[in-house]
Image (tube, rainbow, N blue to C red):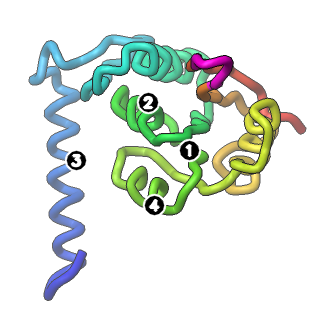
Amino acid sequence: AKGKYPEETIKTMNQIIQCAEEYGASGGLGALYVQHGGEKSLYLGDNGHAMDAAVAKAAVIASLKGLCSAILVITEKGTLPQMVSAYRPNCPIVTFCRTKKMARQLMLSRAIYPVVGLQNLSEAEKPIAAIKEATNMGFVKPGDSVVIVHVDRHLGGRSANFTISTVPE
């Protein structure tokens, strides 16, 4: 926040966000809510990517059912972590992206903590490195469950996947 009163601006913005989320949680928005795992969650749209939206929703439901400490998203374009965020999970979304610009853009989304890196690793190595990095950053600890969401590109196609893993000792 800039200007003459930056602290007051941040406090006011925080109060507005809290009031909006409390109103949303009260059921006042009705049909916009998605029921998953006994919890109500405001769904804010899927941008027309049906496969990614389905995986994002499934990852959030799995994180709630599995009592996961974090959702780790490995992304090339940045749309997948925003879709996960749209389903309002109760845990942080640690996103591994390619560029600083993408990281700055992702910071504006709810619960997303972007990390620039992993681009020099193979697809098979990325989930393991993501778990290690999230552990080093303090988001997860050994024994915690995490959901790992990623997109695999293969022979002219792509598939969006998620796995539930336990952080190794």
- Name the quadrant containing residue 19: top left
Residue for badge 2: 84
Residue for badge 3: 18
- For the point 48% across and 41% down, the residue is 77
Q: Position of residue 39 (x, y in %)?
A: 37, 18
Task: Give how far apart the Cα atoms at labels 4 and 2 are.
Answer: 19 Å
Residue for badge 1: 95
In this picture, residue 21 sits left or right of residue 164 = left
Three-letter amino acid code of the residue under disc 3: Gln
Residue for badge 4: 101
Is residue 154 on the magenta stretch? Answer: yes
Badge nearest the viewer, 1 or 4? 4
- Point out the tag, 3 or 2, that comes first from the N-terminus: 3
Q: Which residues are magenta?
A: 152-158
Task: Give how far apart the Cα atoms at labels 3 and 2 are.
Answer: 20 Å
Task: Give how far apart the Cα atoms at labels 1 and 4 are.
Answer: 13 Å
- Point out the tag, 1 or 4, that comes first from the N-terminus: 1
Badge nearest the viewer, 4 or 2? 4
